[in-house]
């Protein structure tokens, strides 16, 4: 064996060596093992998942799925045709991804050279910062105000800097649930920048900007089947993208990025959209119940939300201790301690029965 001082890790890009890893949510079965509690005793309210799960038709379709031995359609044509009917957009504006996360990375690969800049508006979804680091980009953080509203003037100033190319916005925003309005979005679209509007929670909110895409050459909208359709485990998302941009994205997309199971499950979900949207309506109703119950606890300060979760500031207690106490009783919630989110907890909307149990436990702490 060569005993030279050569170390292969010296070849790793410095930006990767310096970046912080993304912290994902631990899956259900692993949490069950770690807590020593059976899965049926756990209430998982930490990842904004759909408590009602997918359409019942999905399980049947997956069991009967043909052609598993063959590669899936690289263009997801059947799914895109159904998405066209669901979104009222022509299919040529639509691209399907292995989750919306893949499309975030693809957009960055398309536009960014090392040293280019994106605008990020924290506290927000962590994948924008994560993917920017992978792509060698710099992140301009325009921090949200205390009420999580956007600093519009600061964003406009940053968008005019050299090498600033992309603005990422989540609406409703994760983790607080606030939404952008049309006038604000229009101001950003008039800037010399590409706006990526992440609408992962769109079905839980009234606003709909999908029909803006054909009229704005710098607007990309991303959506997912994870939340409203209960397909988080199958990783299916899609983007509504201007034609000049999508033509270039097709060149760099992995050929078979969305597996057959994901495509079939998403197609069946759209066929059974009425059932799934009834569940969305239940979640919205339960969100009201959750927010009202949290407001009755004097050491919690809930923020208004248009998504499938409610963020709370914890006052007079340690949020980490509250999270740990809930976990010991089988209720899993999201804890935050980052800048702007010190001592905050986020509660995903579960079923009414799950929320009742959560509120009962919180009242005893």
Image (tube, rainbow, N blue to C red):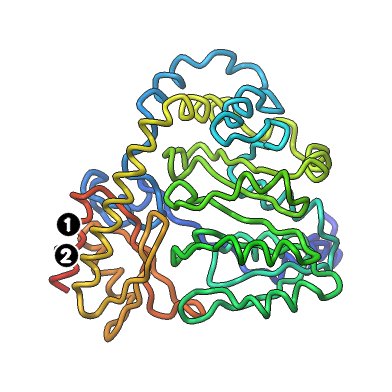
Locate residue 109 relative to residue 103 in the image: left or right.
Answer: right
Quadrant of the drawing holding the C terminus: bottom left
Element type at mark 2: helix
Q: Residue at x 71, y 28 (%)?
A: 75
Relative to residue 112, is residue 49 drawn left or right? left
Which of the image's four quarters has the N terminus?
Answer: bottom right
Nearer-the-camera pick, 16 or 192: 192
Please name the residue shown 83% across and 62% down the image.
Answer: 11
Distance of label 1 from label 2 (alpha carbons): 6 Å
Residue 326 placement (x, y as % from top left): 24, 65
Q: Is residue 141 above or below residue 241?
A: below
- What secondary structure is found at the residue carrying circle 1? helix
Q: Residues within 10 Å of mark 1 (few under 14, many from 20)?
A: some
Crowd tier of the residue under label 2, counting other residues whose Cα lies within 10 Å: few below 14, some 14–19, many 20 or above = some
Question: Which residue in the structure is indicated by mark 1?
Answer: 357
The quarter holding residue 167 reads bottom right
* Residue tagged 2: 361
Callout 1 touching callout 2 (CB < 8 Å):
yes
- Toward the viewer: 85 or 143? 85
Residue beneath the point at 77% across and 66% down: 191
In this picture, is 355 found above or below 94?
Answer: below
Q: Can you give x and y, in whole percent of width and height, for residue 249 in the image?
A: 78, 42
Residue occupying the point 38% across, 54% down: 308
User: Where 261 falls versus 131 (above or below)?
Assistant: above
């Amino acid at each position: 064996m060569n005993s030279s001082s050569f170390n292969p890790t010296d070849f790793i890009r410095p930006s990767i060596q310096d970046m912080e890893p993304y912290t994902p949510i631990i899956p259900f079965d692993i949490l069950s093992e770690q807590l020593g509690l059976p899965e049926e005793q756990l209430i998982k309210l930490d990842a904004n998942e759909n408590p009602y799960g997918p359409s019942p038709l999905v399980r049947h379709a997956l069991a009967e799925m043909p052609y598993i031995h063959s590669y899936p359609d690289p263009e997801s044509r059947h799914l895109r045709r159904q998405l066209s009917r669901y979104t009222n957009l022509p299919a040529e504006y639509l691209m399907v991804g292995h989750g919306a996360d893949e499309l975030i990375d693809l957009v960055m690969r398309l536009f960014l050279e090392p040293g280019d800049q994106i605008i990020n508006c924290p506290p927000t979804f962590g994948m924008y910062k994560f993917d920017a680091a992978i792509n060698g980009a710099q992140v301009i953080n325009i921090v949200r105000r205390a009420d999580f509203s956007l600093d519009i003037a600061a964003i406009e100033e940053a968008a005019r800097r050299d090498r600033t190319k992309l603005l990422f916005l989540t609406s409703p925003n994760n983790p607080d649930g606030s939404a952008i309005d049309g006038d604000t979005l229009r101001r950003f679209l008039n800037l010399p920048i590409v706006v990526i509007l992440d609408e992962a929670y769109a079905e839980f909110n009234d606003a709909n900007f999908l029909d803006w895409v054909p009229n704005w050459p710098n607007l990309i909208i991303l959506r997912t089947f994870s939340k409203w359709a209960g397909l988080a485990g199958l990783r299916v998302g899609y983007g509504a993208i201007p034609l000049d941009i999508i033509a270039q994205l097709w060149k760099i997309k992995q050929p078979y990025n969305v597996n057959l199971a994901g495509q079939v499950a998403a197609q069946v979900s759209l066929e059974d959209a009425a059932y799934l949207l009834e569940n969305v309506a239940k979640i919205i109703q339960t969100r009201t119940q959750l927010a009202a119950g949290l407001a009755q606890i004097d050491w919690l300060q809930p923020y208004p939300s248009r998504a499938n979760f409610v963020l709370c500031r914890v006052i007079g207690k340690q949020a980490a201790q509250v999270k740990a106490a809930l976990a010991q009783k089988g209720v899993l919630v999201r804890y935050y301690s980052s800048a702007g989110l010190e001592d905050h907890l986020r509660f995903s909307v579960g079923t009414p029965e799950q929320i009742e149990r959560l509120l009962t436990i919180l009242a005893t702490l």
